[in-house]
Image: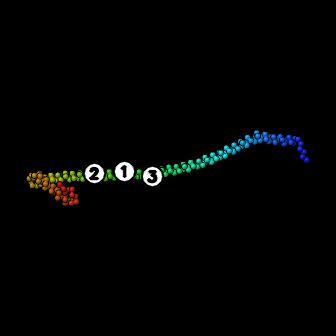
Amino acid sequence: MLDFSVTFVITIVNIVVLFFILKALLFKPVTKFMAEREKRVKDSIEQSEKDKNQAKALLAQYEAQLKTAETEAEAILKAARENAKQEAEKIIADGRISMETTLANARRQLEMEHESAMANFRKEAAALVVAATGRLLNREIKSEDSKLYADMLLGEISHEVTPSNKEVGKS
């Protein structure tokens, strides 16, 4: 059967002593090392989770800022378009006013030139009428009387030719 000898007991005592020695020298440092490593891994995982959550928060913040920036950019573009449109309308209006002013000045100048030309024509026509009348009558006509008659004659002729033009008949 089983024979328990002294060797067996010494072997068991050796194993037990070896167990406590190894436990004191090897198991405790290894266990402590494993616990520290486990703690570092857990801390690292927790820190990673915190960093991940912080990154998500920053991402959300940056996306919100980006949307705000896009909205502001659209508002700035819209305002710039409105300003450009108003400026263009102002330039066009100024151009029209300038064109109308230039056109009115040109019309006034044309009227003045027309009146001047008509006055010159009347003077020359009066002189011709006086000269022709003097030849017909074979005598000299006073220049004041002749001019008055010539102006009246030309006024009547101009009214007959252009009844709607009031400027031509005045003298």
The image quarter containing residue 159 is bottom left
Residue under pointer 3? 78
| Residue at image point 83% right, 40% down | 14
Rounded to the nearest whole Å, what is the CA distance between mark 3 and mark 2?
Answer: 40 Å
Q: Residue furthest right?
A: 1
Q: Looking at the picture, how far across and down is residue 97, in whole percent?
A: 32, 52
For disc 2, the neighbor class at 10 Å (few under 14, some 14 to 19, many from 20) is few
Disc with the residue nearer the chain's start (1 vs 2):
1
For disc 3, the neighbor class at 10 Å (few under 14, some 14 to 19, many from 20) is few
Rounded to the nearest whole Å, what is the CA distance between mark 1 and mark 2?
Answer: 21 Å
- Mark on residue 167? none
Residue under pointer 2? 105
Amino acid type, residue under disc 3 in the picture? Lys
Q: Looking at the picture, how far across and down is residue 3, in whole percent?
A: 90, 45
Horizontal arrangement in the rendering, residue 57 relative to residue 79 (left or right):
right
Q: Mark 1, mark 3: which one is toward the viewer?
A: 3
Of the pair 128 and 61, the residue shown nearer to us: 61
Residue under pointer 1? 91
Disc with the residue nearer the chain's start (1 vs 3):
3
